[in-house]
Amino acid sequence: MHSQSNELPGSRYSPTYIRATWDGTGSVEDASRVFGFSRAKGYDLVRRGEFPCRVLRIGRATRVVTASLLRVLESGEPEYNGARAGH
């Protein structure tokens, strides 16, 4: 990931907007858009345990941890379920 972004500060997928509007978790679809890939690709990465930030499975639902998503956006380092990058 890179630090440059085409997203404006008020954009729906900017860290500022996410902090202000998302609860503790977000949808895989929205988080996939934040990273620039499709919903299908997002769910494929979740299945393989390779989504760039932490996800929770709650019953049949899969949710993305907002704090993890924001850390990944700020650091540029993925934070996979079960292990942090560099392990």
Image: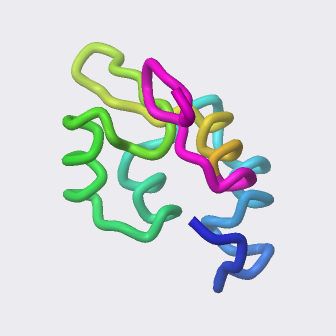
Where is residue 18 drawn, in percent x and y? 69, 53
> Which residue is at a point 52% across and 26% down the rendered structure image?
87
Residue 78 part of the magenta segment: yes
Where is residue 16 drawn, in percent x and y? 80, 59
Where is residue 26 drawn, in percent x and y? 51, 41
Q: Quadrant of the N terminus?
A: bottom right
Nearer-the-camera pick, 85 or 17: 85
Nearer-the-camera pick, 51 or 15: 51
> Which residue is at a point 36% across and 53% down the rendered structure image?
29
Q: Main secondary structure of the magenta part?
A: loop
Residue 69 higher or lower than 4, as above or below: above
> Image quadrant of residue 17?
bottom right
Residue 77 part of the magenta segment: yes
Where is residue 74 drawn, in percent x and y? 74, 53
> Which residue is at a point 46% across and 33% down the rendered structure image?
80
Q: What are the residue bounds of the magenta stretch?
A: 73-87
